[in-house]
Image: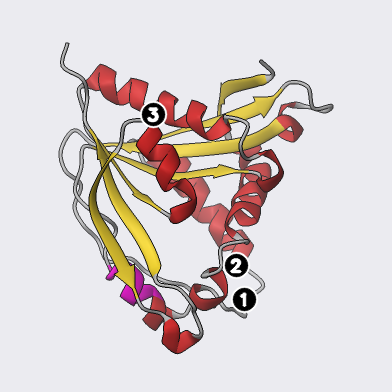
Amino acid sequence: MPLELRGFTLADLPRGLEIEQLAYAPNPFTPVLLPGPFPEETKKMRAEFFIKTFEEDKTARHAKIIDTEIEGDEHEQMIAWGKVHVYQEPPELKPRLFGAGSNIEACDKVWGGHAGATSSRVISPMCTHPTQQGRGAGTILIQWALEQAQGLGLTAYLEASPDGHSLYLKNGFKDIDLLETDLSQWGAKDMHKIWNMMWYPKEV
């Protein structure tokens, strides 16, 4: 199989951020939540935030998926990547901040100003290049995360969009809550949905 799991390094950052932007761009709620305009330094600030997390956050672990049949070096072969945070104790909830270009009122309605639910392991984000979706890269990343969680005896928590919900169900996650938000005042036609999901380690 040409898809392989590899470690993610800072040298992969430009390609990783490109995949992240492309993966989330088709979401119909992006124009509502992130309408712009964005400052010229937005990409630089995103990169600096990622570097800080990569170098200083000891809870964070990263991985990527490459397609060995794509011509080029390993960075050009990367089609997906993911990040998990490992917590031996439930993390402290912190206010979620929204930068310039965000619809702050709409973002606050969706995420409630908090960083997520308490858990021993938080999976976020996982991004696959739009042209490479459906090939199993996401499943490989999920299994990578869950194998580590199983080995540590930790639960895993994530927030799933409609696009990823069924994939997480197939990989053993259970719904613990469904958050629906009405964004029609900003032109959204459907309810915004986020599933809070949990995975529990198997008893050995």
Mark 2 Cα within 10 Å, few/some/many (few <14, many 20+)? Answer: few
Q: Do residues under tags 3 and 1 come within 8 Å of each other at their CB atoms?
A: no
- Of all residues shown, which one is farthest toward the top? 204
Q: Regarding mark 3 in the picture, which secondary structure is present there? A: helix
Query: Which residue type does callout 2 highlight?
Result: Thr
Circle 1 sits on which residue?
39
Front residue of 60 and 176:
176
* Disc number placed over residue 145 in the picture, else none: 3
Mark 3 or mark 1, which has the lower sequence index? 1
**Magenta run includes residue 173:** no
Instruction: Tell me: residue 188, above or below residue 197.
Output: below
Instruction: Tell me: residue 156, above or below residue 14.
Output: above
Find residue 132 and report its horizontal and vertical position in percent.
Answer: 68, 38
* Disc number placed over residue 129 in the picture, else none: none
Magenta stretch in the rendered image: 107-113
* Disc number placed over residue 42 in the picture, else none: 2
Q: Do residues under tags 1 and 2 come within 8 Å of each other at their CB atoms?
A: yes
Task: Tell me the CA gap for discs 3 and 1.
Answer: 34 Å
**Which residue is drawn at the image coordinates 36% and 38% (left, top)?**
169
Find residue 41 and report its horizontal and vertical position in percent.
Answer: 63, 68
Query: Which residue type does callout 1 highlight?
Result: Pro
Tell me if I can see residue 75 in this picture.
Answer: yes
Mark 1 Cα within 10 Å, few/some/many (few <14, many 20+)? Answer: few
The structure's colour scheme is secondary structure
